[in-house]
Structures are given as C-alpha cells and as structure tokens.
Image (cartoon, rainbow, N blue to C red):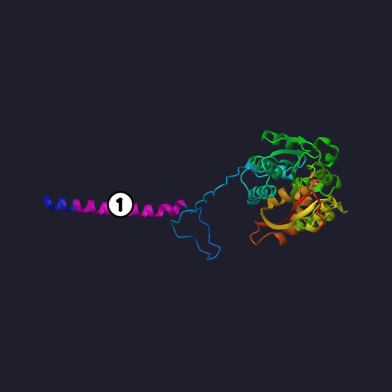
C-alpha cells in the first residue's frame, strides 16, 4: 500500500512537471507574438500579417561617412539655406523628415563636386560668394585641400557662423566687388552657390568676379544655383492660389532660374570662357510639412500678412496634391533643377 501511494505521488508529480513545462513552452511561444503585436504592420502586397514571433526590422547600419542628423542640426541647415533671419521656417522638433535629411546629404555631395571642380593647389587663394549651407561647406573643403579662402556675404549671422568654423568670412556685398580695390587681382578662383542666385544675373557681380582674378591667370569660376523649371508645379500652384485668395494677381518675387544656355550667355558677356554648363534635374521626396516649410514658405516671403500667407500656402498644397502626392497621401515628390557651371576668367574665341 505504501509503495502504491509513492507511485501515485511520483506519477502526479511527473504529470504536474510535464504540464508546467507545456505551460512554460506555451508562454515562451506567445511572448514574441505579444511583444511585437502592436509593431507588426499588414503587408501591402499579400494583405496578411507577418508570422507570429517575427522580430521588428532592425535599422540599417550607417555607411562610411554617414552620420545621424539631429533635429537642431537639420533646423539650422534649412534656416541657412532659406537665407535670412526674416524668413520663418517651421520644423517639427519631434523627428527628421526624409526630405530634410536628403537635402542635407545632397548638399554634402554637391559640395564635393564643386570642390573637385575647383581642385585648388595649396598656393591658391579662393573667393567664396555666399555663405549658405553649400557655400560654407565648399569653403571648409577648400581649406582642407590646403588653399586659402576668403568668403563674403551680406548676412551678418552667416558671416559670424562661418568665422566660428575657422573661415575667413567678411561682410561684403558681391555687387560692390568692382569698387573693392583691395580685392582686385588677388584670387586664383571663385565659387558661387545657391544663395547668390538672385545676383548672378547682375552684370556688376560678374564684372566683380572677373576683376578679382589674378592678371594673366585662367582663374576658375564655378558655381551651382537653381535652374530653369525648378519647383515649377509649386510655383504655378502658388500663382493660382494668390490670384484666387487675394483677388488680384500679386506678383511673386522675380527669381533667376536660367537655362544652361542663358547662364553660359551671361558668363560670356562678361568675358568668361565657359568650359561646362548644364542643367541637373532631380526629384526630392517630401512630406506635406516639408512641402510647406522647405518650398512654399520661402516662395511667399512677399506676403506680409501671416494669416493670408497661411491660406495661400494651404490652397497651393490642395491645388498640386493630385499632381505631386502619391496614392498613400503622405509622400510628395517635387521636381527640382539646378544649373552647374565652370568657366575661366580668360575669354577664348570658340
């Protein structure tokens, strides 16, 4: 009898142990499913959910030379590119949009291209016109190549920021270079970037750039600015929105958006030999917030009434939604165009 009770006790203990093991296995099997239940998203192709226990995707590792852009860095970058403290830029501090990150990364690539086009020797002296994001990066890159740099701008904040980065920056108007005798014949090359776009149509600026080149040198003049057709759909939508809301056609600020032919002609008229000039089309992905902040806000600085400006922007977004926004309703694609050129200060008959 005693042996029978011991056997029964042992059997019950074994059964309890096996049951406990099954419960433990069941709990362990359910844990990943419960843990990632909220993070799983329905597959848009098959219409089904991922198998239970599928871990969430891991972030891709950073490639060589890449870095994580924080919100303050992106905000500072965009404010510089817009150009001026009078232009208010609204940035979501909670996260970084794809368009803002792409814009900053693209600026790095363009900086490298312009610096390679300059290809200065250590003894060269380079004049940088405009201290926006790209201009500042070019100045730093040229310094790393061993050449000396003088950078000019009419935005005191941009000048101070460049100085804090070790750049010899000065508050000088590029339109007055012909009057600055201390600059005449003092540089081997010059570079102009997007912030100089409104002024490169000015004869005085191009004459000034020509005057600062060393006598007898084939000084390079390279640059990149917004080109013909840049953000065309947005500008058309804005014009229509202004006419509809304001009631009269409020003229938008004139923008110099040249074709490659126009830019080449401008340079030749001021005795530059054009070695290369081309339009570079691109498509930028943006959220609706980026569409307002990065593109439409800078285009509407001439509307002083804040409430009216907001209505115009909202209407412009609605007008171009069917053209620029994809089927998800969250991703916008804006066509941009830049013109890049390289010229020399000695005019050669072609």
> Label 1: which residue?
20
Residue 249 shown in magenta? no
The x, y position of residue 30, in whole percent, is 40, 54
As drawn, the residue found furthest toward the bottom would be 46
Where's residue 210, x and y in %?
81, 45
Mark 1 crowdedness (10 Å alpha carbons): few <14, some 14-19, many ≥20: few
Residue sticking out furthest to the right = 248
Any part of residue 130 in sight: no
Q: Nearer the viewer, residue 6 or 314?
A: 314
Residue at 34%, 54% in the rendered image = 25
Left or right relative to 103: residue 235: right
Q: Please name whichever residue, 318 or 59, is drawn nearer the observer in this view of the structure.
A: 59
Horizontal arrangement in the rendering, residue 224 relative to residue 98 (left or right): right
Where residue 285 sits, quadrant-wise, is bottom right
Q: Is residue 74 visible?
A: yes
What is the quadrant of residue 155 in the picture?
top right
Q: Residue 26 magenta-drawn?
A: yes
Residue displayed at 67% across by 47% down: 119
Q: In the shown orientation, is residue 91 left or right of residue 212?
A: left
Q: Secondary structure at mark 1?
A: helix
Question: Can you say which quadrant of the picture contains the C terminus?
Answer: bottom right
- Residue 327 in the image: x percent, y percent? 65, 62
Q: Give the dominant element type of the magenta stretch: helix, strand or loop.
A: helix
Looking at the image, residue 84 lies above or below residue 244: above
Q: Nearer the viewer, residue 309 or 25?
A: 309
> Could you tell me residue 229's position as x and y percent?
77, 58
Query: Across the whole image, how many numbered discs are drawn on residues?
Result: 1
The residue range painted magenta reads: 9-35
């Amino acid at each position: 009898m005693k042996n029978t009770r011991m056997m029964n006790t042992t059997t019950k203990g074994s059964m309890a142990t096996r049951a406990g093991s099954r419960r433990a296995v069941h709990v362990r099997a359910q844990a990943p499913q419960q843990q990632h239940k909220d993070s799983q998203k329905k597959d848009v192709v098959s219409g089904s959910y991922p198998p239970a226990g599928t871990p969430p995707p891991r972030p891709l590792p950073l490639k060589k030379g890449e870095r994580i852009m924080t919100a303050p860095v992106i905000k500072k970058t965009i404010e510089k590119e817009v150009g001026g403290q009078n232009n208010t830029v609204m940035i979501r501090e909670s996260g970084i949009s794809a368009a803002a990150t792409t814009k900053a990364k693209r600026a790095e690539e363009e900086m490298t291209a312009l610096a390679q086009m300059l290809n200065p020797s250590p003894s060269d002296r380079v004049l940088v016109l405009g201290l926006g994001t790209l201009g500042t990066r070019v100045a730093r890159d040229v310094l790393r190549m061993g050449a000396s740099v003088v950078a000019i701008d009419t935005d005191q904040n941009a000048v101070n920021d460049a100085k804090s980065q070790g750049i010899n920056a000065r508050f000088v108007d590029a339109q007055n270079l012909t009057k600055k005798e201390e600059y005449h014949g003092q540089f081997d090359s010059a570079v102009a970037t997007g912030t100089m776009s409104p002024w490169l149509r000015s004869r005085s600026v191009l004459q000034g750039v020509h005057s600062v080149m060393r006598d007898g040198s084939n000084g390079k003049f390279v640059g990149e600015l917004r080109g013909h057709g840049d953000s065309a759909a947005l500008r058309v939508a804005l014009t229509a929105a202004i006419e509809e809301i304001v009631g009269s056609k409020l003229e938008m600020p004139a923008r110099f958006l040249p074709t490659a032919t126009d830019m080449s002609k401008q340079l030749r008229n001021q005795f530059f030999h054009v070695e290369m000039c081309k339009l570079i089309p691109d498509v930028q992905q943006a959220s609706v917030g980026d569409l307002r902040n990065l593109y439409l806000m800078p285009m509407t600085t001439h509307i002083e009434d804040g409430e009216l400006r907001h209505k115009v922007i909202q209407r412009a977004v609605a007008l171009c939604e069917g053209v620029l926004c994809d089927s998800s309703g969250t991703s916008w694609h804006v066509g941009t165009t830049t013109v890049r050129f390289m010229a020399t200060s000695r005019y050669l008959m072609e």
